[in-house]
Image (tube, rainbow, N blue to C red):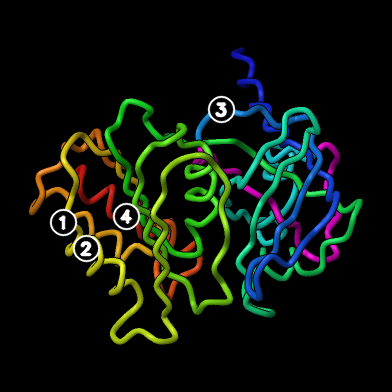
């Protein structure tokens, strides 16, 4: 008789809240200590955070293989994807920024209530982008969801590297300051005073931008609608090589992460058929 295949080990990584900080009215920074995190060198590295259901006790260490085998689906933790803002190897500190809109959603309210000593389980990191030191100039475009990745990228630019950074946030109170030694021209666009739809200011700014000579390295991440519109400009109008551009719709207006991931999976299946 053939023995059943061994269960895949899905033990998650553990982080413990060290401190929190409200860095803007709608952005909360949570610093976790973790002995499990392994940096992959990407500035857009992300983790899959696991938020347990209220009143449910889970095995420790968290093992999603065990959870899926022994708990009903409605008790499985909710997974949310977040970009790592910073990793301090010496201090073993993992910094994650959360957009907060009151009681809306799961991750934001968790961050608002987080206290030192709270445990957060996660998987990852993933990621694929870091600024190319050989590029002649850089273009980074995004909204609040892309701020952690763009902030990390700006701070990792080589000394003197030219970059145009276009960022859309709610208003001036949501602007952030970045470190780094690159020559970054950071331009902020505010939805509170802009006409049109979300992302229109970013699309218009990219379309109007006079691209410098030389080879660029481009990063465009955020709400899927404006990312798609900028994608068309970069590839169809400007003819940029695809290997010089990193594009991702982190989220879709009107959908939570579960709905957006399901939509992307359905689109991928349709394109393969």
Mark 1 and mark 2 residues within 8 Å of each other at the beta carbon: yes
Please give the name of the residue rendered at 64% of the width and 57% of the height, measured from the top-left corner: 97
Q: How far apart are the alpha carbons under marks 3 and 4?
A: 29 Å
In depth, the one of 269 and 147 nearer the eye is 147
Mark 3 or mark 2: name the one nearer the start of the chain: 3
Q: How far apart are the alpha carbons under marks 1 and 4?
A: 21 Å
User: SS class of the residue under badge 3?
Assistant: loop
Mark 2 or mark 4: name the one nearer the start of the chain: 2
> Which x, y percent locates residue 102?
68, 80
User: Which part of the image, by quadrant, shows the N terminus?
Assistant: top right
| Residue under label 4 | 266
Residue 232's disc number: 1
Q: How far apart are the alpha carbons under marks 1 and 3?
A: 30 Å
Snapshot quadrant of residue 191: bottom left
Q: Residues within 10 Å of mark 1 (few under 14, many from 20)?
A: few
Q: Is residue 92 left or right of residue 197?
A: right
Q: How far apart are the alpha carbons under marks 3 and 2?
A: 30 Å
Mark 1 and mark 3 residues within 8 Å of each other at the beta carbon: no
| Residue under label 3 | 40
Mark 1 and mark 4 residues within 8 Å of each other at the beta carbon: no
| Residue under label 2 | 229
Q: Is residue 114 magenta?
A: no
Mark 3 and mark 4 residues within 8 Å of each other at the beta carbon: no
Q: Residues within 10 Å of mark 4 (few under 14, many from 20)?
A: few
Q: Which residue reaches farthest top?
A: 1
Snapshot quadrant of residue 66: top right
């Amino acid at each position: 008789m053939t023995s059943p295949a061994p269960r895949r080990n899905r033990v998650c990584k553990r982080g413990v809240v060290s401190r929190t900080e409200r860095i803007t009215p709608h952005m909360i920074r949570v610093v976790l200590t973790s002995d499990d995190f392994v940096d992959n060198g990407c500035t857009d590295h992300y983790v899959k955070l696991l938020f347990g259901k209220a009143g449910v006790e889970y095995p420790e260490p968290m093992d999603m293989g065990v959870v899926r085998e022994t708990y009903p689906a409605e008790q499985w933790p909710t997974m949310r994807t977040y970009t790592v803002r910073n990793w301090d190897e010496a201090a073993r500190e993992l910094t994650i920024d959360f957009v907060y809109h009151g009681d809306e959603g799961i991750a934001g309210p968790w961050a608002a209530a987080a206290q030192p000593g709270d445990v957060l389980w996660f998987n990852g990191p993933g990621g694929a982008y870091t600024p190319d030191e050989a590029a002649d100039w850089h273009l980074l475009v995004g909204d609040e969801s892309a701020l952690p990745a763009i902030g990390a990228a700006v701070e990792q630019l080589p000394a003197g590297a030219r970059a145009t950074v276009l960022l859309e946030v709610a208003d001036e109170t949501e602007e952030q300051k970045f470190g780094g030694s690159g020559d970054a021209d950071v331009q902020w666009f505010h939805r509170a005073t802009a006409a049109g739809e979300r992302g229109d200011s970013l699309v218009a700014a990219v379309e109007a931008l006079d691209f410098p000579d030389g080879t660029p390295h481009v990063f465009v991440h955020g709400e899927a609608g404006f990312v798609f519109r900028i994608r068309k400009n970069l590839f169809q109008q400007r003819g940029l090589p695809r290997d010089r551009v990193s594009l991702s719709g982190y989220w879709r207006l009107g959908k939570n992460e579960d709905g957006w991931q399901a939509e992307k999976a359905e689109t991928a299946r349709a394109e393969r058929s």
